[in-house]
Image (cartoon, rainbow, N blue to C red):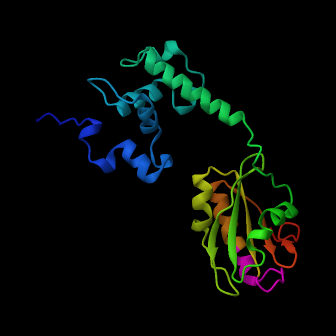
Amino acid sequence: MAERRRYTIKQLPPELRPRERLLSEGPAALSTAELLGLVFGHGTREKTAVELAEEVISEAGGLFGLYNVSVHDLVGVNGVGEAKACLVLASVELGKRIGRVRDPGRPTVASPQDVDNLLRGRIATQDRENFVVVLLNQKNEVLESPTVSVGTLSASLVHPREVFKPAVRASAASVILAHNHPSGDTEPSAEDREVTRRISEAAEILGIEVLDHVILGRGYFSMKQGGLI
Protein backbone atom coordinates (compact mmCIF):
# COMPACT_ATOMS: atom_id res chain seq x y z
CA MET A 1 0.00 0.00 0.00
CA ALA A 2 1.40 3.38 -1.01
CA GLU A 3 2.16 5.74 1.83
CA ARG A 4 -0.38 8.55 2.10
CA ARG A 5 1.17 11.88 1.20
CA ARG A 6 1.24 14.37 4.06
CA TYR A 7 0.80 18.06 3.39
CA THR A 8 2.02 20.96 5.49
CA ILE A 9 -0.34 23.90 6.00
CA LYS A 10 1.64 26.00 3.51
CA GLN A 11 1.15 23.31 0.86
CA LEU A 12 -2.64 23.39 1.23
CA PRO A 13 -4.75 25.46 -1.16
CA PRO A 14 -5.26 29.00 0.21
CA GLU A 15 -8.99 28.39 0.85
CA LEU A 16 -8.09 25.57 3.25
CA ARG A 17 -5.45 27.40 5.26
CA PRO A 18 -6.66 28.61 8.68
CA ARG A 19 -5.16 32.10 8.40
CA GLU A 20 -6.63 32.75 4.96
CA ARG A 21 -10.02 31.36 6.04
CA LEU A 22 -10.03 33.58 9.13
CA LEU A 23 -9.36 36.63 6.97
CA SER A 24 -12.05 35.76 4.45
CA GLU A 25 -14.73 34.16 6.66
CA GLY A 26 -13.98 35.40 10.19
CA PRO A 27 -12.72 33.52 13.28
CA ALA A 28 -16.08 31.81 13.92
CA ALA A 29 -15.56 29.73 10.76
CA LEU A 30 -12.48 28.02 12.22
CA SER A 31 -12.42 24.93 14.39
CA THR A 32 -11.00 25.14 17.90
CA ALA A 33 -7.88 23.28 16.76
CA GLU A 34 -7.39 25.71 13.88
CA LEU A 35 -7.67 28.69 16.23
CA LEU A 36 -5.15 27.20 18.64
CA GLY A 37 -2.95 26.27 15.69
CA LEU A 38 -2.87 29.94 14.70
CA VAL A 39 -1.82 30.81 18.25
CA PHE A 40 1.05 28.32 17.95
CA GLY A 41 2.09 29.78 14.60
CA HIS A 42 3.93 26.65 13.51
CA GLY A 43 4.07 23.00 14.39
CA THR A 44 6.94 20.50 14.44
CA ARG A 45 8.68 18.43 11.82
CA GLU A 46 6.16 15.64 12.41
CA LYS A 47 2.97 17.63 13.02
CA THR A 48 1.35 20.74 11.61
CA ALA A 49 0.34 23.45 14.06
CA VAL A 50 -3.30 22.31 13.79
CA GLU A 51 -2.40 18.66 14.42
CA LEU A 52 -0.37 19.70 17.46
CA ALA A 53 -3.31 21.80 18.68
CA GLU A 54 -5.66 18.83 18.27
CA GLU A 55 -3.36 16.74 20.45
CA VAL A 56 -3.15 19.44 23.12
CA ILE A 57 -6.93 19.78 23.26
CA SER A 58 -7.37 16.01 23.36
CA GLU A 59 -4.84 15.60 26.19
CA ALA A 60 -6.63 18.35 28.14
CA GLY A 61 -9.90 16.43 27.86
CA GLY A 62 -11.51 18.88 25.46
CA LEU A 63 -11.72 22.65 25.17
CA PHE A 64 -12.99 23.17 28.71
CA GLY A 65 -10.03 21.18 30.01
CA LEU A 66 -7.75 24.02 28.90
CA TYR A 67 -9.40 26.22 31.53
CA ASN A 68 -7.25 24.81 34.33
CA VAL A 69 -4.34 23.33 32.38
CA SER A 70 -0.82 23.87 33.74
CA VAL A 71 2.58 24.38 32.13
CA HIS A 72 3.51 20.90 33.32
CA ASP A 73 0.47 19.40 31.56
CA LEU A 74 1.23 21.21 28.32
CA VAL A 75 4.93 20.48 28.04
CA GLY A 76 4.08 16.84 28.53
CA VAL A 77 2.68 16.83 24.98
CA ASN A 78 5.37 15.98 22.47
CA GLY A 79 6.15 19.09 20.43
CA VAL A 80 4.97 21.60 23.05
CA GLY A 81 7.78 23.44 24.78
CA GLU A 82 7.63 26.24 27.30
CA ALA A 83 7.11 28.88 24.57
CA LYS A 84 3.98 27.22 23.17
CA ALA A 85 2.76 26.40 26.69
CA CYS A 86 3.00 30.11 27.56
CA LEU A 87 0.99 31.00 24.46
CA VAL A 88 -1.78 28.61 25.49
CA LEU A 89 -1.88 29.85 29.09
CA ALA A 90 -1.86 33.49 27.99
CA SER A 91 -4.75 32.86 25.56
CA VAL A 92 -6.78 31.03 28.21
CA GLU A 93 -6.17 33.79 30.75
CA LEU A 94 -7.29 36.44 28.25
CA GLY A 95 -10.48 34.45 27.70
CA LYS A 96 -11.10 34.29 31.45
CA ARG A 97 -10.60 38.03 31.86
CA ILE A 98 -12.84 38.90 28.91
CA GLY A 99 -15.54 36.75 30.46
CA ARG A 100 -15.32 38.71 33.72
CA VAL A 101 -15.42 42.16 32.15
CA ARG A 102 -18.69 43.98 31.62
CA ASP A 103 -18.68 46.37 28.72
CA PRO A 104 -19.69 49.74 30.24
CA GLY A 105 -21.07 50.78 26.87
CA ARG A 106 -23.32 47.76 26.53
CA PRO A 107 -26.96 48.53 27.43
CA THR A 108 -29.09 46.16 29.50
CA VAL A 109 -32.65 45.27 28.54
CA ALA A 110 -35.00 44.55 31.45
CA SER A 111 -38.36 45.73 30.06
CA PRO A 112 -40.23 46.60 26.85
CA GLN A 113 -39.51 50.25 27.65
CA ASP A 114 -35.80 49.47 27.37
CA VAL A 115 -36.42 47.99 23.92
CA ASP A 116 -38.35 51.10 22.93
CA ASN A 117 -35.51 53.31 24.19
CA LEU A 118 -33.00 51.22 22.25
CA LEU A 119 -34.81 51.12 18.91
CA ARG A 120 -37.32 53.98 18.69
CA GLY A 121 -34.99 56.45 17.02
CA ARG A 122 -33.86 53.78 14.58
CA ILE A 123 -37.06 52.11 13.32
CA ALA A 124 -40.23 53.57 14.86
CA THR A 125 -40.83 56.12 12.08
CA GLN A 126 -39.64 54.06 9.12
CA ASP A 127 -42.13 53.80 6.24
CA ARG A 128 -41.54 50.04 5.92
CA GLU A 129 -41.54 47.35 8.55
CA ASN A 130 -38.05 46.75 9.88
CA PHE A 131 -37.64 43.49 11.79
CA VAL A 132 -34.87 43.62 14.40
CA VAL A 133 -33.55 40.88 16.66
CA VAL A 134 -31.98 42.08 19.91
CA LEU A 135 -29.31 39.58 20.96
CA LEU A 136 -28.71 39.28 24.71
CA ASN A 137 -26.15 37.52 26.87
CA GLN A 138 -26.97 35.79 30.16
CA LYS A 139 -26.97 39.16 31.96
CA ASN A 140 -29.50 40.59 29.48
CA GLU A 141 -26.83 42.88 28.06
CA VAL A 142 -27.22 43.73 24.38
CA LEU A 143 -24.65 42.00 22.20
CA GLU A 144 -26.04 43.24 18.87
CA SER A 145 -29.36 44.37 17.42
CA PRO A 146 -29.22 43.60 13.69
CA THR A 147 -32.05 44.34 11.28
CA VAL A 148 -32.80 40.95 9.73
CA SER A 149 -35.63 41.90 7.38
CA VAL A 150 -37.15 44.97 5.74
CA GLY A 151 -40.66 44.41 4.47
CA THR A 152 -43.28 46.22 2.44
CA LEU A 153 -45.31 49.24 3.45
CA SER A 154 -47.60 47.06 5.55
CA ALA A 155 -45.85 43.76 6.20
CA SER A 156 -42.52 42.31 7.29
CA LEU A 157 -41.61 38.89 5.96
CA VAL A 158 -39.05 37.14 8.16
CA HIS A 159 -37.91 33.53 8.45
CA PRO A 160 -36.54 31.96 11.68
CA ARG A 161 -33.19 31.26 10.00
CA GLU A 162 -32.72 35.02 9.45
CA VAL A 163 -33.33 35.59 13.16
CA PHE A 164 -31.12 32.85 14.53
CA LYS A 165 -28.15 33.07 12.18
CA PRO A 166 -26.79 36.18 13.99
CA ALA A 167 -27.98 34.80 17.36
CA VAL A 168 -25.96 31.61 16.97
CA ARG A 169 -22.95 33.50 15.63
CA ALA A 170 -22.99 35.82 18.67
CA SER A 171 -23.64 32.94 21.15
CA ALA A 172 -26.72 34.80 22.39
CA ALA A 173 -28.46 33.35 25.46
CA SER A 174 -31.78 34.92 24.53
CA VAL A 175 -33.37 37.26 22.00
CA ILE A 176 -36.06 39.90 21.87
CA LEU A 177 -37.91 40.36 18.60
CA ALA A 178 -38.94 43.84 17.55
CA HIS A 179 -40.44 45.53 14.54
CA ASN A 180 -42.25 48.74 13.67
CA HIS A 181 -45.72 49.36 12.27
CA PRO A 182 -45.53 52.25 9.78
CA SER A 183 -49.21 53.02 10.47
CA GLY A 184 -48.35 53.84 14.09
CA ASP A 185 -50.93 51.32 15.37
CA THR A 186 -49.08 48.82 17.59
CA GLU A 187 -51.82 46.18 17.77
CA PRO A 188 -50.24 42.87 16.65
CA SER A 189 -51.59 41.48 13.40
CA ALA A 190 -52.39 37.83 12.74
CA GLU A 191 -49.10 37.62 10.81
CA ASP A 192 -47.20 39.09 13.78
CA ARG A 193 -48.62 36.38 16.02
CA GLU A 194 -47.84 33.62 13.53
CA VAL A 195 -44.26 34.81 12.99
CA THR A 196 -43.76 34.97 16.76
CA ARG A 197 -45.09 31.42 17.15
CA ARG A 198 -42.81 30.01 14.43
CA ILE A 199 -39.73 31.78 15.76
CA SER A 200 -40.47 30.67 19.33
CA GLU A 201 -40.77 27.05 18.21
CA ALA A 202 -37.43 27.25 16.42
CA ALA A 203 -35.89 28.88 19.50
CA GLU A 204 -36.85 25.91 21.67
CA ILE A 205 -34.95 23.57 19.36
CA LEU A 206 -31.86 25.79 19.47
CA GLY A 207 -32.03 26.42 23.20
CA ILE A 208 -32.28 30.19 22.75
CA GLU A 209 -35.13 31.85 24.67
CA VAL A 210 -37.43 34.39 23.03
CA LEU A 211 -38.11 36.86 25.84
CA ASP A 212 -40.54 39.16 24.05
CA HIS A 213 -41.74 40.58 20.77
CA VAL A 214 -42.13 44.35 20.90
CA ILE A 215 -44.02 46.33 18.26
CA LEU A 216 -43.12 50.00 17.90
CA GLY A 217 -45.35 52.73 16.51
CA ARG A 218 -46.90 55.74 18.21
CA GLY A 219 -46.19 53.82 21.40
CA TYR A 220 -45.19 50.20 21.86
CA PHE A 221 -46.87 46.85 22.45
CA SER A 222 -45.22 43.96 24.32
CA MET A 223 -46.47 40.50 23.35
CA LYS A 224 -45.05 39.22 26.63
CA GLN A 225 -47.06 41.67 28.67
CA GLY A 226 -50.06 41.05 26.43
CA GLY A 227 -49.96 37.33 27.21
CA LEU A 228 -49.14 36.34 23.62
CA ILE A 229 -45.79 34.71 24.49
Q: Quadrant of the C terminus?
A: bottom right
Q: Nearer the viewer, residue 58 or 85?
A: 85
Residue that lies at the very extreme toward the left in this rendered image: 1
Report the residue at 86% width, 59% height from top: 111
Q: Nearer the viewer, residue 25 or 77?
A: 25
Residue 122 visible, this orientation: yes
Residue 168 in the image: above or below residue 3: below
Q: Position of residue 187 (x, y in %)?
A: 84, 81
Residue 212 magenta-highlighted: no
Residue 60 visible, this orientation: no
Q: Residue 40: which quarter of the image?
A: top left
**Left-right relation of 130 to 217:** left
Q: Position of residue 36 (x, y in %)?
A: 46, 33
Number of marks drawn: 0
Q: Quadrant of the N terminus?
A: top left
Task: Please report the bounds of the magenta region as a residue range.
Answer: 182-195
